[in-house]
Amino acid sequence: MWQADAQSQVVVDLDAIRANVRTLRSSTPAQVMAVVKADGYGHGMVPAARAALSGGATWLGVCTLDEALGLRDAGLTAPVLAWLWLPGQPVGRAIGCDVDLSVAGLSQLAAVIAGAREAGRAARIHLKIDTGLSRGGAVAPEWPQLAESAGKAQADGYVEVIGVWSHFACADAPGHETVDRQLAGFTDALDVAKRLGVEPQLRHLANSAATLTRPDTHFDLVRPGIATYGLSPLDDPAVRATLRPAMTAHARVLLSKRVPAGQGVSYGHTYVTQRESTVALVPLGYGDGVPRHASSAGPVQLNGARYTVAGRVCMDQFVIDVGDAEVAEGDEVVLFGPGDGGEPTADDWAQAAGTINYEIVTRFGSTRVPRVYRGDAA
């Protein structure tokens, strides 16, 4: 299913997103927050959010206020949590639009109180405790003061403490010692908050990896991100088999030609033909999401056969050496997909580029590559 006149495109299977969320939802008594930040990990934030909600998610998670407000502007009314924001941003508008806000310190709490005054209503907040990721969240020595101050703000009618939350560092490595340590730190923080009169409606800690492997971390809400889109954070074939990748990246051959043996290909001539060969030009590059680190390594499928990028990935294009195979302009090239037809997967590209599958799909958010949606949820 090609968009008219497109020389490249990404196809997003919204039914796969819905099915993935349904699978995750069936594995836990907790509610599911589908994380749709970064334009739905490259899949399209609003369509992905709708598909996730139809699969049983009851919450949506984003990073920025712009993302949260974008969901509201699209007419989505499900609870939304935004966790990366600065005082001075449109906090009052977010509160007025029923956007839940993460609060990790006293300065953020003060900004939320000011925003609540502006909005004329209590802000819904989730207090974040840093249990060992050393990223966002209040560290343990600061936690009692934050919890106590939030409790006072709640008593004064400025906030409603909806959640207490944290985030794992190594849940994608089952058995890693930090998982149990962070879980213990989280339960300790909950106990401290309770002693100070703060008992949240929701406690949430589990990301995709913990949702898939650690039911003891699920509490009231789980927050799957990459698993929503059918990719696993775990190097476990059994886990991967339970999910359905939602994205397929395609392009069409723009040009094919014969070149002699010993011919350098692409910038720097890091690839040289071993014999007379046909090379095919594919109109996708790192400006579209193809990782440059996959130069001379990224796999593609063309006319049922596997090939590897020949030489460096350029901003707008790359080349493959197909030897003596017949190739015509307009032939379809599949960079990655679910793997049903033997095509490479996002995991294959991640291995080739020395990265993770999250980065591969999220890169394909370029405005130059049209997205096409399919499935009943489209």
Image (cartoon, rainbow, N blue to C red):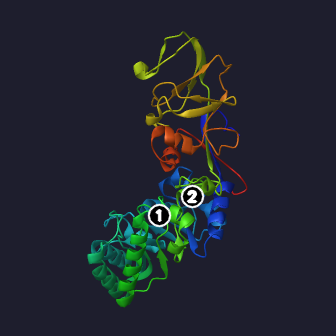
Q: Which marked residue is nearer to the observer: mark 1 or mark 2? A: 1
Dot 1, crowdedness within 10 Å: few (<14), some or many (≥20)?
Answer: few
For the point 38% across and 69% down, the residue is 91
For the point 49% across and 33% down, the residue is 285
Question: Residue 138 at what x, y percent from top left?
Answer: 31, 72
Q: Earlier in the sequence, mark 1 or mark 2?
A: 1
Disc 2 secondary structure class: helix
For the point 73% across and 56% down, the residue is 376
Dot 2, crowdedness within 10 Å: few (<14), some or many (≥20)?
Answer: many
Q: Is residue 349 left or right of residue 149?
A: right
Q: Which residue is mark 2?
A: 227
Question: Residue 2 at what x, y percent from top left?
Answer: 68, 38
Q: Of residues 278 and 148, which is closer to you in this image?
A: 278
Which disc number belongs to residue 343?
none
Q: Is residue 258 visible?
A: yes
Disc 1 secondary structure class: loop
How many numbered discs, if any? Answer: 2
Q: Is residue 83 visible?
A: no
Q: Is residue 274 left or right of residue 136?
A: right
Inter-mark Cα distance, 1 to 2: 20 Å
Compared to residue 194, the image places residue 211 above or below, namely above
Compared to residue 302, the image places residue 89 above or below, namely below
Disc 1 marks a residue whose amino acid type is Gly
Q: Of residues 369 and 280, which is closer to you in this image?
A: 280
Compared to residue 308, the image places residue 19 above or below, namely below
Compared to residue 328, the image places residue 164 above or below, namely below
Disc 2 marks a residue whose amino acid type is Ala
Which disc number belongs to residue 175?
1
Quadrant location of the N terminus in the rendered image? top right
Q: Residue furthest right?
A: 376
